[in-house]
Image: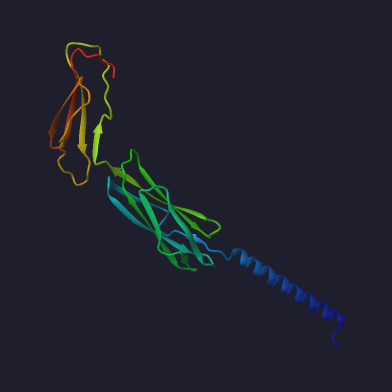
Amino acid sequence: MISKSVLLKVSLVAVTVAATASMLWFVVQMYAVPRVSLPGGAQFDFGTIDEGGDIRHVFTLKNTGLKTLRILDVRTGCGCSKAVAKHTEIARGDSGEIEVAYHARPVRFREFITCYVLTNDPRWQVLQLVLTGEVRFRIFWFPQSVSFYEKAGDTAATREVRFSSRMTARSPLEVEILSTDSRLLQPRVTSDPEGATVTISLLPGCERGS
């Protein structure tokens, strides 16, 4: 016959095994989650593009977790861009793609376009993908504005504004219409292969300060 002490030991071992198995199951369930990684990075520098040009870039998402990675939603921060998830479910070990398109708008400083990707990864519930680069204006002029502050005199005061084309595929810049809504100002334009210069004159004897 099996003694009570042996039965007790067997029971204790069974309870220990069951507790250990339960703990392992709990640990596995706790860590069995999707994990998103970005083999190519979360930011893409498109360099320099002309105003009105188009950029497309595909970001790769890899699921390094133990459960299926789900793309719940994809959004962009402005109307000049859009994003599409080519894969909404990514199995364990597989990869998916997010394509981001951008129509270049004129900006004064460096452009940053952000795409927000909502996932079921507990660590990255909102993933940010960024397109960045420089946008070249079609037409650039300097200075941006002119003012006349000299005292009234018998000679015309003049200011010059330089216009140039900054397109990659450069073509001659032509000023077709030049006009002003003030009778006190007299504009004229001179063109050259690199652009055009507009000379604005405030007529003699006019009150100045604008």
Residue 191 is situated, as x and y percent measured from the top left of the image, at: 13, 33
Q: Residue at x 40, y 63 (%)?
A: 86
Q: Nearer the viewer, residue 41 or 202?
A: 202
Residue 170 is situated, as x and y percent measured from the top left of the image, at: 18, 44
Q: Image height check: is 196 above or below 117?
A: above
Q: Residue at x 33, y 40 (%)?
A: 107
| Quarter residue 167 falls in | top left
Quadrant where the C terminus lies? Answer: top left
Q: Image height check: is 112 above or below 204?
A: below
Q: Nearer the viewer, residue 109 or 37?
A: 109
Q: Residue at x 34, y 46 (%)?
A: 133
Residue 199 is situated, as x and y percent measured from the top left of the image, at: 18, 26
Q: Image height check: is 10 above or below 92?
A: below
> In this image, 130 relative to 104: left or right?
right
Quadrant where the N terminus lies? Answer: bottom right
> In this image, 151 relative to 58: left or right?
left
Residue 160 is situated, as x and y percent measured from the top left of the image, at: 20, 26
| Quarter residue 172 falls in | top left
- The image shows a total of numbered marks equal to 0
- How is this picture coloured? rainbow
